[in-house]
Amino acid sequence: MMSRQQRKKAAAALHEKLQILRSITHSRALSDASIIMDASEYIEELKQKVVRLKQEMACEEAAAGGALQLKHSSSSPSPAVTVETLAGAGAGHGFLINVFSDKSCPGLLVSILEAFDELGLSVLQATVSCEDTFRLEAIGGENQVDNVDEHVVKQAVLQAIRTYSSQGCRQQQE
């Protein structure tokens, strides 16, 4: 058993740590439970920032890779596609999908979204740019659980791009 003095020291140490946590998370809460809840929300915000930063980094890497491919290849470079598994996106898991191509083709987004639909993925969040280049950053959540992993998603996206490129984009460029 702890003596009364030891309990007082432990309570004071806990209070001090909660005040540090309150300060770090910019919480204005007064109760211990509220400080902990604010800290939990702060951690979730940080997780979302990490996901966004990973998206930006993958997109920049894809853009740099696309530029390198253009310099080293006279043929048409294939789009860069990266897929990462995200824990905690919906009921099961989700995916962070980045697609970058040095050229933009009308309708490419539709083909990729159809591939998502065929896999049973719903788009939870997406950023798309298709002015001079094609860039897609999407977070896809799994609707149906049927052995969908990073590799399956990447192959489906690549197949959608290949199919579209052979049908739509080349016809428009000719």
Image (cartoon, grey):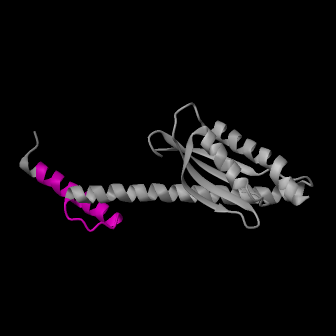
| The quarter of the displayed image where residue 17 is located | bottom left
Quarter-of-image position of residue 160: top right
Residue 100 % position (x, y): 72, 56
Rendered position, 155 above or below 38: above
Does 152 appear above or below 30?
above
Q: Looking at the magenta stretch, what is its main secondary structure?
A: helix
In the rendered view, would you say 119 is above or below 76? Answer: above
Quadrant housing the C terminus: bottom right
Q: For the magenta stretch, what is the residue range?
A: 6-31
x then y, percent, for residue 103: 80, 60
Indicate left or right for 88 with 95 as reference: left
Of residue 149 and residue 10, the one placed in the foreground of this image is 149
Which residue is drawn at the image coordinates 57% and 31% (left, top)? 147
Q: Identify which residue is drawn at 24% across, 59% down.
A: 34
- Answer with left or right where residue 4 lies relative to residue 84: left
Q: Quadrant of residue 61?
A: bottom right
Image quadrant in which the N terminus is located: top left
Locate residue 39 relative to residue 93 in the image: left or right: left
Q: Residue furthest top?
A: 147
Residue 161 in picture, x, y percent from top left = 75, 48
Percent position (x, y) of residue 24?
35, 64
Q: For the image shown, how many numbered marks are present on the structure? A: 0
9 in magenta = yes
Which residue lies most toward the left here? 4
Residue 91 shown in magenta: no
* Residue at the (20%, 65%) spot, across then down: 30
The structure residue drawn at horizontal position 61% and vertical position 38%, both measured from the top left corner, is 119
